[in-house]
Amino acid sequence: MLIRKSKPGEVPEREVTPEPIYLGRRRLFQAAALGLSGIASRLRATLPSREKPPAGALRPLPAPRDAKYKVEGREITPEAITAGFNNYYEFTTEKRRVAELAEHFDSRPWQIEVRGLVEKPLKFDVDDLLKRFPLEERVYRLRCVEAWSIVVPWTGFPMAKFIEWAKPTAQAKFVRMVSFLRPGQCPGQREQTWYPWPYFEGLRLDEATNEVAFLVIGSYGHILPNSNGSPLRLAVPWKYGYKSIKGIVRFELTDKQPPTFWNKLAPNEYDFLSNVNPAKPHPRWSQATEEEVATRRRIPTLPYNGYGEYVARLYS
């Protein structure tokens, strides 16, 4: 058996977590324990055509852009790329097929609940949020743990305002978030039974109320496409992309650190905080650089993905 040795800084896509897809959960942990899992497919081979437009028309969602949150030295990634190149295992592990398989997913109507250590549990439709919170657009980096990155104009509102509205009690220290469970509409949930569906994530309360934490309901001037987490997702750009949970249906305030999806599956590879750190390599590849999807060039990865001025104090 030949084992190909990757070039320095090269992070092909399929090796990131291929074992749960092809060999099942047991062999994932065997490979992780032995340190033998490799990175096998080329990131470039998975990129969609830059001329291909996003599928389907989406309702416009105009909002003023907050100039404070901008990405110096990089262009916004064309929507044709972000709509067709995405990790969303609920549908598939193949990035280029997510949009196709998610196209007919029912993201409206959509009920969301808030429970746990709050003054009063809440239940509401996602579109109620459009009326309750003033919307703004923020241009954020998104850095995947697989070492690729994009720049996206998200539309939404600060998570801090949402937490304030939820009225957590003094005992609340963390917020747990849970995604949907619809195996009838999601081939990934139906076929990849080794994953502990539905997806779940968590933040410390001081992280959730940091000014950069953003709840997203739109992008590129319209409602979020299904492939990017419609109707509601999180954007915490100083953390690796898997922390920005998609398709949220529940928020739970708690006094204990909640388990998170990837930390439960592979705690030696994915910790609870998962802050972007170029000096801390993933057990299977370097995090010092990343591949900019639109240009396919390698660029240095920034500490906290460039948001250190806002969040570094949380971890000192």
Image (spheres, grey):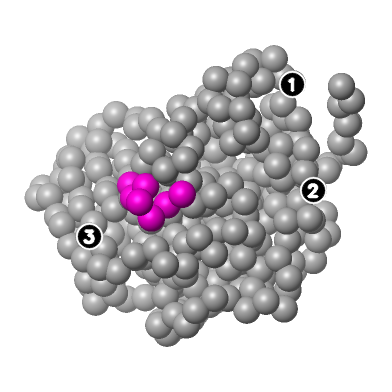
Where residue 231 appears, as percent x and y from the top left, is 37, 65
Q: Residue 36 carries which label?
A: 1
Residue position for label 3: 111
| Magenta region includes residue 184 | yes
Residue type of the residue flagged with mark 1:
Leu
Residue position for label 2: 42
Residue type of the residue flagged with mark 2:
Arg
CA distance for labels 3 and 1: 43 Å
Residue type of the residue flagged with mark 3:
Gln
Where residue 108 appears, as percent x and y from the top left, is 29, 69
Q: Which of marks 3 and 2 is nearer the N terminus?
A: 2
- Report whether 93 appears left or right of 231: right
- Residue 279 lies in what quarter of the image? top right
- Report whether 152 appears left or right of 134: right
Residue at 68% in and 32% down = 282
| Magenta region includes residue 99 | no
Residue at 62% in and 65% down = 84
Task: Write down the region rendered in magenta.
Answer: 181-187
- Residue 252 lies in what quarter of the image? top left
Residue at 71% in and 65% down = 48
